[in-house]
Amino acid sequence: MADNKNIQDGRDRSKVNGNESYELSYLEEKLGVSREQVRAAIEAVGNNREDVEAWLKKKH
């Protein structure tokens, strides 16, 4: 089933979808990193948003 972007209930806020350009762009801008760094973080620690952000802050 496709992700319905009209439903906004917070279910996806704890995860980063590496296939969604807007999610990658948000982290790039928020943390001042490149798209490749965001993808590397997802590969290294999984798609949990807190883990990805912590990894990027530590590496950056």
Image (tube, rainbow, N blue to C red):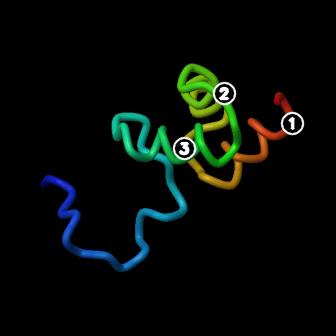
Q: Is residue 18 above or below residue 49?
A: above
Residue 3: x and y, percent? 21, 57
Cα gap from disc 3 to disc 1, whole angstroms? 16 Å
At a point 48% along the width and 40% down the height, the residue shown is 25
Left or right: residue 39 versus residue 58 is left
Question: Which residue is the extreme one toward the bottom?
Answer: 9
Residue 20: x and y, percent? 34, 40
Residue 42: x and y, percent? 58, 33
Give the label on residue 44, or none.
2
Left or right: residue 42 versus residue 9 is right
Q: Could you tell me the amino acid type at mark 1?
A: Lys
- Placement of the N terminus among the 4 image quadrants: bottom left
Which residue is disc 3 drawn over? Answer: 47
- Judge the density around disc 2: few (<14), some (14-19), many (≥20) Cα neighbours within 10 Å: few
- Judge the density around disc 1: few (<14), some (14-19), many (≥20) Cα neighbours within 10 Å: few
Cα gap from disc 3 to disc 2, whole angstroms? 9 Å
Q: Is residue 46 above or below residue 2?
A: above
Give the label on residue 58, or none.
1
Question: Which residue is the extreme one toward the left?
Answer: 1
At a point 65% along the width and 30% down the height, the residue shown is 41
Q: Is residue 30 above or below residue 37?
A: below
Q: For residue 45, what is the image quadrant?
A: top right
Left or right: residue 5 versus residue 20 is left
Q: Nearer the viewer, mark 3 or mark 1?
A: 1
Give the label on residue 18, or none.
none
